Amino acid sequence: MRTFIIRSMLLLAFILLAGCAQAKGSAELEQRGASPKQQQKQTQKQDQIEPYVVKGYVRDMNGKPLSGVSVYADNTLLYDSNILGVTDENGQYLLELPELTTTWRVGGKYTSTYNGKTFNFDLVPDVDQPLAGKTGAVRNFTWKNDSGKIYIYPSFGGFDDSMPEFNMSDLELTLTPVGPVLGGGEGQTIVKRAGPVVDGAGVDSIPIGKYKATAKWMPEGHDPIPMQLCLNISGKYADSVDVEFNKSQYSFAYLGELNVKPAK
């Protein structure tokens, strides 16, 4: 009973303090200045650790600030008790924490659209460690566009007995970007050998985008064998196909799927 009363009092205190902290943090974000000198001072201040404050920035791999990203500080003592904030136009955020003797974990959620589709990403800070509220901390985030995965399925009906045994690791996939990738950056041609990936076989760590895919089979001791491909949903084989990524129904991954067979 005593434990219940103590936790209830802590929860009430958290709610009251959190409301004040969020209002204060939002006001401070709105006051961020415009001149270069002010921006320099703000950047320096952003790097200084303050008690009961967690702050930092969210950027992409090229250092571009990401605005409108949701950032939260999760109280490790009280379940589902979070301080919430959003990055400003400079990709910066500041959360004022209630003065409770507890620790916090920081995380974020980034949402972006590409070719009419919405993509959601959970963000982990570059330094993923809990922090004490009374100490405060700086927690920066770097979003990496590398969560695309392509499953590859060999169509064994397209192989004949004169061919060597097929090993997925002998398949080389070339992905040529069709336009910019998610985030607006210029895509780069990717050449990867297929192999084991989570829950299947194929290639992973692909930037979300649209690609023209081609493939060749390179069994040891044989000349390279051109392959034909088809999207897993169409069944029409060609020397190249355009592949995009969709949200998996069974996980948080973004997937493309290809069938392959030797070209005749």
Image: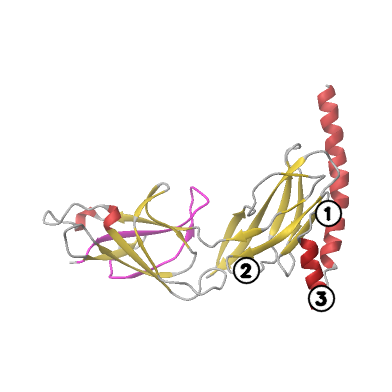
Question: Residue shown at 85%/27% (left/top)?
Answer: 5
Please give left or right for residue 251 compared with residue 234 in the image.
right
Nearer mark to the viewer, of 2 and 1? 2
Res 242 → quadrant: bottom left
Q: Label 2 vs label 3: CA separation?
A: 20 Å
**Please, what is the three-letter code of the amino acid marked with disc 3?**
Lys
Residue 8 in view in this figure: yes
Region of the chain picked out in magenta, as a range: 236-263
- Label 1 belongs to which residue? 22
SS category of the residue bearing label 1: helix
Q: Label 2 vs label 1: CA separation?
A: 27 Å
- Label 2 belongs to which residue? 63
Q: Which mark is residue 37?
A: 3
SS category of the residue bearing label 3: helix
**Please, what is the three-letter code of the amino acid marked with disc 1?**
Gln
| Magenta stretch encompasses residue 161 | no
